[in-house]
Amino acid sequence: MTNPPALAPTEPARPDGSTAGRPDHPTRARLGRRAGGTVGADSREMVRLRRFMLTPMTVILLGLTAFPFAYSLWISLTDRTASASGDFVGLRNYTDLFGSAQFWHALRLTLVFCVVAVAAQLVLGFLVALGLNGLRREHRVLRAALILPMAATPVAVLFGWKVLLDPSQGVVNWLLGEVGLPQPDWLGTPTMAMVTMIVVDVWMWTPFVMVILLGALSGLPAESVEAAHVDGANWAQRLRYVVLPHIKPFLMLAVLFRGIDSLKAFDSFQVLTAGGPGDATTTLNMLAYRTGLQFLDFGKGAAVSTLLLIVAIVFGKVFMRFMRREARA
């Protein structure tokens, strides 16, 4: 019995299932092109869907930010007061502010408050986060307790501080008197008032920095620290060459958030000192409030607010550029 005629010689199969020396099956190629086309169409549809979903919120946010800013900018170019509708005066309000010693005094106080408060918050927040990072069971309880100043209602907390720091009936001065220490007027003397404002701000917002840095430390690879320890690095060297480079982006993020927030701080100053005594705690935000809403000079008050916004934007832009440069390095 003769064997049936042999078919075309078989070729060794490739790992992907096709035969060597032969192009893929045309049906497979068509399916690949069709699948690629489908994926591309799906991607375009997803982009359109995202734009459709983002457009309403973008319009709302622009309306809530762009319109008030444009209106405030326009008011700052007029001499509008409570009794006058306001004529266009150009940059006169700004030139008056630049020639005013009160404006430069408020700017200096704002920068001092921002730099000192943020620096203290970074140091204390880092130390607390470093201590909490090594704990286990106590970690959650302590973290929950330490974020209470940040989580509580600011105005209620500030009124509590005002009662505690009362020079005649406050608990703080009573305790100092019991141990024979001086009882200062915490909010009634110029130098002590600004120091007190910085201390209160540090107490309220150090937990914010702590939470950011605690999250950064929890992501630090233990192998890196152990390798540095094996190589003979002491505690300070491990901190400098392993820990700090890892959490540096988070430190910079905390500086950005807290710096901008400190520049525009208002509620703590209004509740505790109202800008006093005199103008010892009159920052730019307090100066804008006094000028616009107490003295009813809306044009000049809007000019102060615009300048404060410019300071915050410049700080944010410069710092973000620095962050990008550090990231590339």
Image (tube, rainbow, N blue to C red):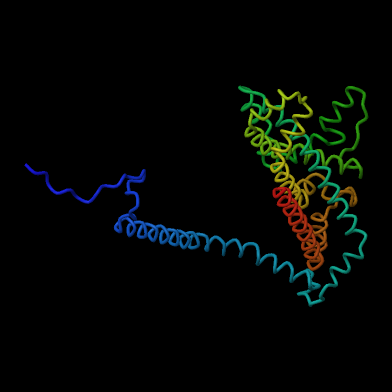
Residue in the picture at 82% in, 56% down? 284
- Residue extending farthest to the left is 1
Q: Position of residue 18 (x, y in %)?
A: 32, 49
Left or right of 216? Residue 89 is right
Front-lying residue, 37 or 123: 37
Image quadrant where one finds the N terminus: top left
Residue in the picture at 69% in, 31% down? 146
- Residue extending farthest to the front is 2
Front-lying residue, 277 or 113: 113
Q: Position of residue 138 (x, y in %)?
A: 63, 23
Residue in the picture at 61% in, 28% down? 140
Vertical position of residue 75 compared to residue 168: above or below: below
Image quarter of residue 127: top right
Vertical position of residue 132 compared to residue 65: above or below: above
Left or right of 208? Residue 274 is right
Image quarter of residue 179: top right
Front-lying residue, 261 or 39: 39
Q: Position of residue 96 (x, y in %)?
A: 89, 68
Image quarter of residue 23: bottom left
Q: Position of residue 217 (x, y in %)?
A: 67, 33
Residue in the picture at 89% in, 42% down? 188
Vertical position of residue 153 compared to residue 79: above or below: above
- Report the number of numbered marks: 0
